[in-house]
Structure formats: C-alpha cells, structure tokens
C-alpha cells in the first residue's frame, strides 16, 4: 500500500469514500473541500490518499488551524469499507503526522482532531484536550517534539 499526496485525478474517488462513510454530509460541500487543495488559497488543505493496486483505499487531510500558526488540524480521515480493519486508517494518520512534522515555517507544534472515536486516536498517541467539545465530538491533540 502506498500513501501519497492526492492529485486532482483522485477527487472523484476521495468523494466516493467520503460519501460511503458520511452519506448525510453535503456532497457539494465535500467537493468544494477537496478542490480547495488545488486552489490558490493562502490556507489550504493537503490530502493524503492510500492507494492499493490503483484503487484508493482511504484518505485524510490536514490544514493549518485558525487557532494558531503552529497548530494543524487533521480531518476527513476516511477508509473505503472494502479496506477497513487492515491498518489503512492508522497508516494514513501516521503519514499525516509525518507530513505535518516536516512543516518548519512556521514550525508545526501541535496537531488537533475533533473526533467521535477517541480510542482510535489515543492508540496513535493523541491525548484528550476537551471531553465535551462539540456535541459528541471530543477534541484531541498530539504535541510534536
Ligand atoms: C475509523 C477508520 C478511519 C479506521 O480505519 P481502519 O483502516 O478501518 O482502521 P485500522 O485497520 O487502521 O485500525 C484498526 C484499529 O482501529 C480500531 N477502530 C477501527 N474503527 C474504529 C472505530 N470506529 N472506533 C474505534 N476504534 C476503531 C479497531 O478496533 C482496531 O483496533 P486495534 O488495532 O486495537 O485492533 C475507518 O473505520 C473509517 O473510515 N470510519 C468512518 C469514518 C470515520 O469515523 N473517520 C474518523 C473521523 S475522525
């Protein structure tokens, strides 16, 4: 399995994975969010994809946070149902952390994630920042050293 930065050509497959896991989320908004990676915005997301034999098995993104210049948000971690429980999700998160670690100007010091599955992220080194962050979402973070 290869983890790499998404290209424009991946947009449809990414959208499909998002749709399968989050059917209630607006497709129009999801499309805009993906396309933002290829825009000229000052603050834009980077998506990573996991590819297996030419098919996308999962995706995940990060973006500089509005909270602070040294903080990055992870979002849209999503694994295709055919590839779940094979280590794809963990692998993507590890690569997202690795990519964010490379950012030196301004240096990345903290990665945050708002999630309903704290156990999954705890096993990857994230710690709870706020238990009742947003409805049933918990805010977690990992300090980069
Ligand atoms: C959550 C998700 C990303 C996990 O990806 P995955 O490739 O299936 O998981 P992996 O194979 O890498 O990891 C498996 C481990 O994660 C745990 N795990 C998987 N899905 C989980 C979930 N929904 N809640 C809690 N733990 C979960 C498994 O129990 C397993 O634990 P173990 O290593 O202790 O045995 C994937 O199920 C998914 O896309 N879910 C829907 C979208 C979602 O919830 N995204 C997270 C948004 S913050």
Image (cartoon, rainbow, N blue to C red):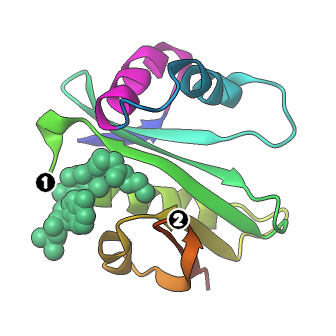
Which secondary structure lies at badge 1?
loop
Q: Residue at x 70, y 77 (%)?
A: 109
Image: magenta residue range? 6-21
Q: Residue at x 50, y 20 (%)?
A: 27
Q: Is residue 123 above or below residue 106?
A: below
Q: Is residue 60 visible?
A: yes
Q: Quadrant of residue 53?
A: top left
Ligand 1 shows up in the quarter that is bottom left
Q: Is residue 132 left or right of residue 116?
A: right
Residue 145: x %, y % from top left: 61, 86
Please name the residue that numbered disc 1 is placed on: 85
Please name which of the two marks, 2 or 1, marks the residue nearer to the observer. 2
Residue 98: x %, y % from top left: 51, 63
Q: Nearer the viewer, residue 68 or 26?
A: 26
Label for residue 135? Answer: 2
Label 1 crowding class (10 Å Cα cut-off): few <14, some 14-19, many 20+? few
Q: Residue at x 29, y 29 (%)?
A: 20
Q: Nearer the viewer, residue 113 or 97?
A: 113
Q: Is residue 58 above or below residue 131?
A: above
Residue 75 located within the stretch drawn in magenta: no
Q: Nearer the viewer, residue 49 or 102?
A: 49
Which secondary structure lies at badge 2?
loop
């Amino acid at each position: 399995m290869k983890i790499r930065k998404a290209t424009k050509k991946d947009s449809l497959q990414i959208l499909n994975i998002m749709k399968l896991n989050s059917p209630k989320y607006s497709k129009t908004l999801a499309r805009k969010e993906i396309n933002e990676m290829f825009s000229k915005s000052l603050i834009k997301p980077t998506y990573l994809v996991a590819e297996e034999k030419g098919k996308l098995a999962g995706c995940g993104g990060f973006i500089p946070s509005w909270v602070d210049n040294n903080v990055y948000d992870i979002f849209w971690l999503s694994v295709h149902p055919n590839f779940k429980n094979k280590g794809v999700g963990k692998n993507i998160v590890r690569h997202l952390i690795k990519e964010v670690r490379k950012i030196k100007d301004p240096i990345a010091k903290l990665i945050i994630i708002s999630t309903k599955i704290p156990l999954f992220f705890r096993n990857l080194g994230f710690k709870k920042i706020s238990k009742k962050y947003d409805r049933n979402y918990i805010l977690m973070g990992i300090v980069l050293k």
